[in-house]
Amino acid sequence: MSFRRILIANRGEIALRIQAACRARNLAWVQAYSEADADSLPVRSSDHTILLGAAAVAYSYGNAARVIAAAQEAGCDAIHPGYGFLSENADFAADCEAAGITFIGPQADIIRRMGDKATARRIAQGAGVPVIPGSEGPVSAEDGAALADRIGFPLLIKAAAGGGGRGMRIVPDAGSFARAYEGAAREAEAAFGSGAMYLERYLEKVRHIEVQIFGDGTRFVHLGERDCSTQRRHQKLVEEAPAAGLAADLVAEIREAALGLARAVGYRNAGTVEFVVDMTTGDFYFIEMNTRIQVEHPVTEAVTGLDLVAEQIAVAEGQPLSWRQEDITITGHAIECRVNAEDPAKGFMPRPGTITSYAAPTAPGLRIDSHLEQGHTLPAQYDSMLAKVIVIAPTRTAAIEAMKQALAAYEIEGVPTTIPFLLELMDDPVFGAARIHTRYVRDVMWKGRPLQQML
């Protein structure tokens, strides 16, 4: 089966990335857009477009019924959701199937099971993948308070349907539990439509390591790991491939655990299995699976030379996976920096506005994924990411140097950006030595600075 026409139900740089994959596979597409994006680059670079509705996510990219209706109106037989919005919405995937439209991603049942963190945890345990000690499923505030004493403090309260750090609280002691639970549940209900919470032991100093996997339901491969430890407020700032400074046998165990989970659910399409590595003990634990293409997929593409989005489309068409494990080779070191319209000096506060000047650098080994151009106004309704800067070089040291040159030459005026912060990060000796962990930015690099507590 070959798709007749794909609806791209997303915006910004990922919309352009999916368009590039469609061109690579000689497939037609229709670009969906909101009123706020009517004059955006993804819309102007498409021969066929369709308006979803008003700028608010609930009326446009997050409106499942409207997106499916748009696909039908535009004569599309498949929908690529990109990341965010509807990309991990199991009901949407099921509705696509019911409407006779192929959802480019895993089956609705897998999204549902792996999207519920408590269920995913049980599946991981069944597959022999280590999980962090904690509750066996969602718990009420009352039951959680009793269980918390047995798990021990500090601990994490996490949204069962959560992600991106939302609906998550670190609880230092029993006296803080009730208030933290209430706040996390309220945030989770607003963000994910579910206030179900579960508990985990909080590990003080960890690396965040994730494995890119791919499956076609019967055959499964991993494409190596990414290190996403450089974060603020549990949100990623920099991603690298491969992970530096980890023992080869540990990396092999993590990769095999990710494959074991993919096999356990008969995974189909692109997915990412996320782990933390306890820097004190060297133990690793499964934390969640993302059933979509990731923001940081370009660093994996850089070190493998593979087109992950094109492969997503091929597998969704029913084709067998193009790669065997022995076909995958990891070459060089890649780094991705997320450039956001944020003011680091003010706690990374988002600052939308109009781009008054824009010039992207070019260099061998440099890739910039962005929808920016001069005169573009950033809609306040969407996230603050402006661009992804990706470099690949033979070594990590050379990649850091290449990143510094790229960031220094990147001209974005009209809004504050995180480029000055990223340049400082690339110069930081702790980052240079790969002694990073998920609290490194807050507790080491930003120690003693204004608004440290907000990171």
Image (tube, rainbow, N blue to C red):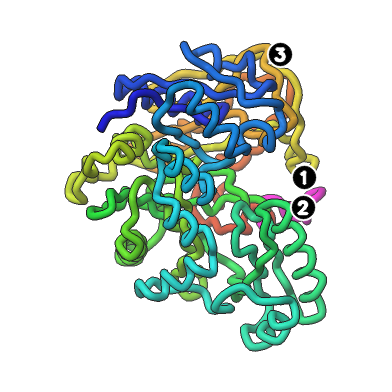
| Residue 180: image location, x then y, percent | 77, 69
**With respect to residue 267, does 278 lie above or below?**
below
Look at 42% across and 36% down and name the residue there: 101
Look at 58% across and 25% down and name the residue there: 408
The quadrant in which residue 331 appears is top left
Q: Residues within 10 Å of mark 3 (few under 14, many from 20)?
A: some
Tell which circle, 2 or 1, labels the residue nearer the N-terminal end.
1
- Inspect the image, locate mark 2, and give the three-letter code of the amino acid beneath it: Met
Tell which circle, 1 or 3, labels the residue nearer the N-terminal end.
1
Q: Residues within 10 Å of mark 2 (few under 14, many from 20)?
A: few
| Residue 239: image location, x then y, percent | 49, 45
- Inspect the image, locate mark 1, and give the three-letter code of the amino acid beneath it: Gly
Q: Which mark is residue 454?
A: 2
Look at 30% across and 62% down and name the residue there: 263
Contact (CB < 8 A) between labels 2 and 1?
yes
- Inspect the image, locate mark 3, and give the three-letter code of the amino acid beneath it: Thr
Q: Does 102 appear in magenta?
A: no
